[in-house]
Amino acid sequence: MSKGFRQPARRVDSGMSLIEVVIAMVVLGAMSVAVIGVIMNTQSLGVANRARVAASNLAARDLDIVREQFTRSPASPMAVANAGTQVNPNPLPGQTAGQPMVMDGKAYTLTRTVAWNVTGSGASACDGGSLVLYPTLRVTITVTWADMGAVKPVVTNASLAPKKDDGVQGTASFVAVKVTDAAGAASPGRGVQVWSASETKNGVTDTSGCAVIQVSPGAAGATYDARVTDAGYVDLSATPTPTKSVGMVATGQLVNNVTFAYDRAGSVTLHLVDESGAPVPPSAVVGGQITLVASEFSGASGARTVPATASDITVTGLWPTLYGAHPGTTPPATGYTTTPLPAGGSVDIDVVVTP
């Protein structure tokens, strides 16, 4: 009797193992994250591009309005120039001047600045010194919007030339005032005012830190003064609205002899402590004096005395520079440490006192 041939057992597919399932899920998840990232980035770029297109349209619209205003009448160039910096001056239909302009649910802020180009050879009127026959008006329009993140604002520039019979020519007079910050760099956007006995004119510094203001001194000329007017700013002497003399301005003259060092004011808090660093009780220091010393100042000395009225004393409205402090009016023989005060910032200084 012969034996039957036995077929080999076939392997039965038992499906995917748990490890295979986990690996597949991880791969799928990684691919999904990458795809979602691409989609989100594309959507973000699309939103930013739409916002920039809308901002560009608003800037072009405002520039067309300025051009029309500039050429409306012989007095129009001066009216546009004297308007200075304006925010949302021409609202969209149904909206309010001075308020953000809303398009497709997004708020846009348009800032327009104007300044006369009156130099013949210098980079700006503050650094030049010559008066061109027919100066042009430089218009800069900047548009920003909410949630713009790292996207740069839309900026449009144009130069508008008045007609030769519009009263803006070589017989006009100008005062150019330069404003720098604590580092000596140009300070754009600062408000400047010049005045005489018969008129007051306002302007705003441009990107070079120069404000150019046309004035009308009359045939005999007139004496002018200038000041900077921004809230929260001070000069080297900690004066919030410093004033300087421009001097005599004659017909057809550009006067640019005034420069202000002007920056955001800061504050210093003096902590009165003993040698161990513990706060000194107010009752132990009342009646004494603390001297606060600035390394950069205007005048004979950068030292000022502060009454010791409490354990912690805050001095505000300070020019940004290095500051140190010591008890009394005589500096200690061992000296004292100094701390830099940034523009618009605040610092703390420990002053070791003997109760």
Image (cartoon, rainbow, N blue to C red):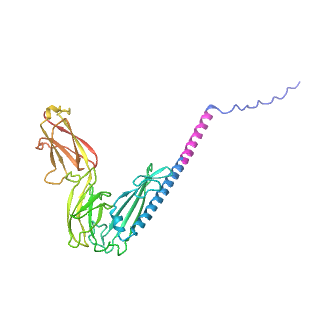
Where is the N terminus found, in terms of image quarters? Answer: top right
Furthest-top residue in this view: 1
Asked if residue 293 lies left or right of residue 29, the reply is left
The picture places residue 242, in percent across and down from the top left corner, at: 21, 55
Based on the displayed image, in which of its 4 quarters is residue 186 positioned? Answer: bottom left
Say which of 65 and 113 sits in front.
65
Dominant secondary-structure state across the stretch colored magenta: helix
Where is 45 relative to 130, above or below? above
Q: Which residues are magenta?
A: 19-39
Where is 240 relative to 121, above or below? above
Asked if residue 141 lies left or right of residue 225, the reply is right
Where is 82 relative to 317, above or below? below
The picture places residue 233, in percent across and down from the top left corner, at: 26, 51
Residue 20 counted in the magenta span: yes
Asked if residue 46 lies left or right of residue 282, the reply is right
* Total numbered circles: 0
Where is the C terminus found, in terms of image quarters? Answer: top left
The picture places residue 151, in percent across and down from the top left corner, at: 44, 53
Residue at 47% across, 54% down: 94
Based on the displayed image, in which of its 4 quarters is residue 216 positioned? Answer: bottom left
Asked if residue 282 lies left or right of residue 129, the reply is left
Residue 81 counted in the magenta span: no
Residue at 20% across, 33% down: 279
Say which of 333 and 296 sits in front.
296
